[in-house]
Image: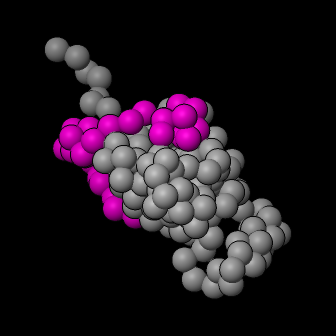
Amino acid sequence: MSDAQPVEKASIVVMSGDMDKVMGAFIIATGAAAFDMQVSMFFTFWGLKAIQKGNLTGKGAMGRMLGVMNRGGIDRLGPSKFNFGGMGRWMFKKMMKAHKVTPLPQLLKQAQDLGVKLTACEMSMNVMEIKKEDLIDGVQIGGVASFIADASESKFSLFI
């Protein structure tokens, strides 16, 4: 019989595409990974913005319109309050830099470096006309079953 402790796991659903909520999700994910937990993040609907490259998406008229109005890219995310047409994003980035808060692109890289599993929701991608090549490298595509498989073995699961 092995004396090895079972690996603790954590799972996070990222449904929001708001800067502050995505930041919270990545801070929790990297913190858990730093404590040797296996972490999985499942990005769905607006959360997909955080793992997109930032190029225009969509094939049909509505998909292209959605791609223009809701362009992805972790550096394009605005705060959930006080966005002011993009000024809020600039202001918060400036304030975070002044207080030495790790910026979102760096948090994303840290998560990848720590082995956090990033999964894009296939159904949301289909609805929003986002293709695999629109996503950053290292993201896998899966459905709700892949999240449930991870969450069912997790010590904690969060919905952000």
Q: Is residue 80 left or right of residue 106?
A: left
- Name the residue rendered at 69%, 48% in the picture: 106
Give the extent of the magenta segment.
131-160
- Of residues 134 and 99, the one drawn nearer to the viewer in this rendering: 134
Q: Position of residue 5 (x, y in %)?
A: 29, 29
Is residue 153 inside the magenta stretch? yes
Q: Quadrant of the C terminus?
A: bottom left
Q: Is residue 111 above or below residue 100?
A: above
- Look at the image and tell me whether residue 120 can be seen: yes
- Please identify the residue farthest to the top as the structure is shown: 1
Q: Is residue 101 left or right of residue 71?
A: right
- Please identify the residue farthest to the front as the structure is shown: 61
Q: Is residue 37 left or right of residue 51?
A: left
Q: Quadrant of the N terminus?
A: top left
Q: How many marks?
A: 0
- Name the residue rendered at 62%, 70% in the picture: 78
Quarter residue 79 falls in: bottom right
- Name the residue rendered at 64%, 41% in the picture: 109
Q: Is residue 46 above or below residue 53?
A: below
